[in-house]
Amino acid sequence: MPYQPRMLLGNINVFSIPYVVYDLGIICIASLIWFSFNFIIKYTKIGKLLLSVINDREMSSALGINVNKFFIYTFTFGCLLGCLGGAVSAPMISVVPGIGVEVIVLAFAVVVTGGLGSVTGAAIGALFIGLARTIAIFYAPQLELFIVFFVMAIILSFKPEGLFGSKEVRKI
Amino acid sequence: MRDLFNNEKLILIIFLFSFIGFWFVLPDYAINTITLSFCNGLVVLGLLLLMRLGLVSFGHGMYYCLGGYAVAMTYNFLQIKEVFFLVAFAILTGFIVSFLLGFFVRRFRGIFFAMLNLALSMILFGIIVKSVSLGSTDGFGIKDLTYLSYTIEDQKRLNIFSYILIVVFTVLMMLFVMNFLRSPSGKMLEAIRENEIRSAYLGISINKQIHKVYIFSSTLAALGGGLMVILIGHITPEDTAYWTKSGEFVFVAILSGSLNVFAPLIGSLFFEFIRSYALFYFPNTWQMIIGIVLILGILYLPEGIGSIFNKRKK
Amino acid sequence: MLLEVKNLNKKFGSVTAANNINFQMNENEIIGVIGANGAGKTTFCNIITGYLKADSGEILYQGADITKLNVQEIKNIGIHRSFQIPQVFENLGVLENIIITELVSKNKQNTLFEDAYTKQNYENAIKLLEKFSLDVDTFKDKVVKELPQGERKVLDILIAIIGKPKVILLDEPTSGISTDEKNSIMNNILRAIKELNISVLFIEHDMEIVEKFSERVIAFYNGEIIADDKPSKVFNQNNVKKFIIGGS
């Protein structure tokens, strides 16, 4: 039997449905990241500075925030999360050089569905898209990507700024 | 060199005749690459129009696909073999579909516009793959064609007729786009890109203008797709509506920039030649070469290939 | 009556930006609007021009109801505006800004078969700059983003005047302009506007400017109009002194 790191932690019964412990672990990691992100953005100094940089770059730098540093940090952090996502999902999928491209298209769909700039939006968007995709794979495997974008188009036609996106009214 | 490019129409005429002249000089495989990149260049030309508006579409392959299928299906189901009819069908299909979808997409901007177009193109892909009557994953092929009732045999798909047809159509479209961008109507695009609020307060009906440009742009893409089928003789959904093809168009569009109408064609030629040479000499690493080219392009020509010929007026 | 606002209300969450506003404007009037920051002056402009929709109330223009029209439609019937933060085409040249505005005002949005940037159009744009007694050399051949804030502001107002407006709303026309220049700029603008028989409503914080240039002043406080009269009378009203001008 080949080496399968995903199965090393064994199975567990959740409401009498057998579930892989590793998958539960991923859910835990994701929730942890979601929770800490919301916490950092809402309640810490760094989070508030970050919001100010997002809202008005010029004003923030006038107030003495090192905007470039924030760009580098957020970019680095974003890449880090990308790496983490790849690392934890690697045991569940077949890893090939091109997987990044498939993922980025899905990630864009998730972000747009959830609404730009919202952590909760990304989480809920991912749930929507993920569930739609799973249902599609179960019932009609050829339509996998089709369903993903179909769900996205439907959601956007009712809520053009995404599920949790805020409508921007520019100050004039 | 830069002053020369101020007279764009003259350049366009030189462009037209030099490419017609290439038929007699260049070897067949080069001509083939040129013709194919002209077909793709038309799609990129359409993307240029959207870029002038400040929009990018990640799903222009949809119209490329629609144009191609319009040609292939008219040929197969209605037995029409006259090239000019087929091309007209491609244009008409692109026009009608983009007119209808335009009402939906014109409300969106930025990443939403881009992703929504991607979504639409993937939905089209899904529909085609799922329905056997639309050829499913196999697509359609076409055989003999007539050029104004002069029949050309199947084997010689790339012939002087198809070559001149494609070159002339492309140059004609470049002329249209060029004139459009210089006209008052084309200046509305710049206004909308620069400041939507002011544009609305000037009385520009923004959604209608975006709709108009969307139709124009999509029709160009459909024409590109139609000509591609006439050249290659076959169409499959994977090569057209799937998002990798749209991604390729956006790639070339970014590489070319939106400064002038020659850039999309030059960019497209550049891309096709790099790809065929890279595929030939470095079969396993050609994507890497394409990636390096894009990075170099962004670093040294941030406004795209077009900026070699003329700089945006300061 | 040119413009009439009846019982206008607007709330942003718990903030009342317009509280039962009634207002009338006659032809060729020059009205100054004063009020502290957040008193609802800009919101008032935004509602009249259709950028924001009122919660209730109606707006009449020459007797016709324009409450439900959008920004473009309101512009097309002759109500133009300038902005607190200049809204101009930053990456285009000054003359190109003017030319595009003129093309739209001539209803050439969909004109295909002519050039937009012709010599003729450039000359017209330069003539327009001259008409507003602006220094042509500082403006032409420049991209808007290279201009200092004050000149951008002037360009913004200039763009608002192009076309044939009946009413023009100027949102803080002199903010960001140095004190010495304020007077001359207001002079130039208002002179040009008067020649064209346009009614003006301008929001202003500088009381001297308001006193000097307006024939009538309305004062906003917490979304309400608390005074509406000749400048000398409004400035002497007790609540205006207390809430807006400061002092006793």
Image: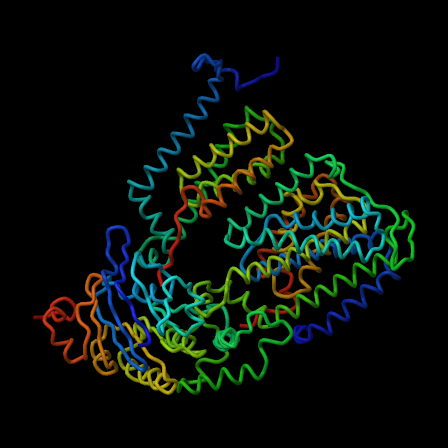
* Frontmost residue, C133 versus C69: C69
Q: Where is residue C183 in the image (x, y as percent from the top left)?
A: 28, 83
In the image: residue B174, left or right of residue C160:
right
Depth order, front residue of A143/C174: A143
Horizontal and vertical percent position of residue C3: 32, 73
Q: Is residue A90 left or right of residue C50?
A: right
Tell me which colouring the rendered structure shows: rainbow
The image shows residue B306 at horizontal and vertical percentages of 64, 64
In front of the other: A116 or B310: A116
Instruction: Judge from the rendering whether residue B15 lies leftward or rightward of residue B126; answer left or right.
Output: right
Compared to A162, does A136 lie above or below? Answer: above
Q: Which residue is drawn at 42% across and 39% down?
A: A121
Q: In which quarter of the image is residue C186?
A: bottom left
The answer to which image quadrant residue B260 occupies is: bottom right
Quadrant location, the N terminus of chain C? bottom left
Name above or below for residue C192 compared with residue B76: below
Residue closest to the far left: C248
Task: Report the front residue among B274 and C113.
Answer: C113
Rendered residue at 14%/70% (across/down)? C240
x 56%, y 18%: residue: A4
Image location (x, y in percent) of residue A77: 43, 40
Q: Which quadrant does the C terminus of chain C fall into?
A: bottom left
Q: How many marks?
A: 0
